Image (tube, rainbow, N blue to C red):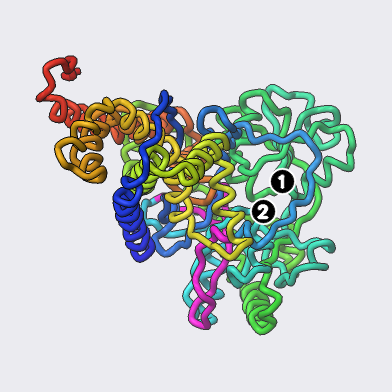
Amino acid sequence: MHHTRYALSRAIRLIVLVSIGLIPILAAAEEPNVGTVTTDNTAGTVKGTPADMPPSTVTADTAEKGDAMQNDTSASDETADAEENPEEETEYTDADFTEVETVQASSDILRYGIDLEGGLPYFMDNWDGSGTLIGFEQEIIEEICRRLNRKPVPVQIDWDKLIPGLERGLYDIACEGQEITPQHEEVVQFTVPYYVTGLQLCTHERNTDINRLADVAGKRVGVPKASLAYDLLAKMGTVDIATYNTEVNGFDDLIHGRLHAVLFDQPVALYYGKPREAEGIRFINEEIGAVKYGFVVDARQPELLEQVNAILTDMRASGQLRNILERWGLWNPQTAREFGDPDIQPRTEPVMLNAWVEQSRPISGFPARIKRYISFLPLMGRGALLTMEVSILAMLLAVALGFMLATVRVYAPWPLSLLSVLYIEIIRGTPVLIQLYFIFYGLPAVGIKLSPFIAGVVGLGLNYAAYEAENYRAGFSGVPHTQMEAALSLGMTRWQAIRHVIAPQAFRIVLPPVTNDFISLLKDSSLVSVITLVELTKTYGLLATKYYDYFGTGIMVAVIYLLLGLPFVRLARYTERKLAAHLPTTPNLRR
């Protein structure tokens, strides 16, 4: 990542040099009439290791859409992620996976695809703050890697892209509750089952009329996307189905009365619902369906499939797999029958489940809540650092390119000036979110593949350059024409006049709107989460989902954004005072 940032810095410097080098050429041209200038402000956006993942984890998480700039576009947060329309199969292209940062395949490592957001109890960040991954699937993967003498390397990717990403060779195994069904087996290679479970129906204690699956007819029920639960309710025909990417938001809606029930896989329901029984969540005691879990192995690696199958079979026979499942409170009669084990009752306490329930229990008392919020600070600090990196680099690019565009528009011959106008109007006339998608997902179709960090910086920088160009044009227009005439009459060349007379005065004029643009870019940097960068806003989503706390965590993030922007506001005002100190008519700028 350091190499890419260094390359980007070199590119920005090159842009500045090019823009400066163009001025002597343009200065020879006739100066066109400068008309009235209007200035507009818009939006902006970085990259790094997700806050909820260990440093060795590779990042490619795709967040939900953030607010687009100037009301161009908007998207819903996970809290309102319900979709009422029937599901449609999504077809992905190679461009949809350019954001996945993986590593080259090697016999020394085992790459496995996961999605940490909503990954309980398959994979999760250790609650002890060590930065390691835990989960019952994580323990299975670690044992497989130990026997294969390979290092486990997780690859973070959106859950619904796990199988398509595997097909594109981004990792060797797709994990996280992959359901073995006849339809799935026609297109991918599954290992032998390592777990068998069913569906769990949960409702709220106020819904006393729901005591079995048949009772949800005519009611609104939340389910995961592309799941057995969805297919089962769809066959009933009379259920109002809402689909969710993250199960915690389904339970939120159930508690808030937006749903009558939720139908999730038992492990997910257990880990997301049990800690919230005090809020009224009620589990329905009914065995619904049967789901077999298996890892999906890259079809181009038949030897790996054979090796993993042998390991899983041995773990099943030796009882090692049972021990893992019991630790996580997941041993059940269905799995016992699959393993041929006559003892269906757990032999040991579910220590990991109990620890999770205790850890995620709603905090009572102000001191305990403050202590938890303090524990968030290292994660938010990493997200804030990433936000600042993206914002500063994007603004540097915007300022350099914007100055070049403004100079071309004001002082270049009309063909070049027209190109500058076209760029500015096209960029300002299209949503920044569309521009980010085009750069990140569209350009790979013509062979241009950018990392999430570079795509975020370039996308925001190119967008803001259009607005900075108008700011600079306003600055040029604000300097009286007599200044240029006086400079030329003193024997200066046009380039010298622009550099020593016009540009300094224009800079003082445009400093306030440029500062305002940077503050907007800093806040709008949350948009880069759509191209898998885990900045401050994405960190907020991960923490709020993990601890069921959107209110207090949201206030913390808002305060951090405010604190990030204030120093730049003060710096800009200080610079304004210094630049305007010699002007007798300058208004009071102390405030």
**The disc labelled 1 sits on which kind of residue?**
Lys
Would you name the residue on which mark 1 appears? 225
Judged from the image, the secondary structure of the residue bearing numbered disc 2 is helix
Q: Does the magenta stretch include residue 106?
A: yes
Q: Is residue 428 above or below residue 462?
A: above
At 44% from the left edge and 28% from the top edge, which residue is drawn? 40
Q: How crowded is mark 2: few (under 14 residues within 10 Å), some or many (20 or more)?
A: few
Q: Hey, which quadrant is residue 579 in on the image?
A: top left
**Residue placed most toward the observer, 260 or 115:** 115
**Residue placed most toward the observer, 543 or 266:** 543
Note whether residue 359 is visible.
no
Quadrant of the snapshot with the C terminus: top left
Q: Do the residues labelled 2 and 1 touch (CB within 8 Å)?
A: yes
**Image spot of residue 513 (x, y percent):** 33, 28
Judged from the image, the secondary structure of the residue bearing numbered disc 1 is loop
At 57% from the left edge and 57% from the top edge, which residue is drawn? 157
Numbered mark located on residue 160 in the image: 2
The tally of labels here is 2
Query: Which is nearer the N-term, disc 2 or disc 1?
Result: 2
**Residue placed most toward the observer, 395 or 48:** 395
Note whether residue 316 is visible.
yes
**Residue placed most toward the observer, 497 or 127:** 497
| Principal secondary structure, stretch drawn in magenta | loop
**Image spot of residue 352 (x, y percent):** 50, 53
Q: Is residue 529 above or below residue 568?
A: below
Which stretch did the figure color magenta? 98-127
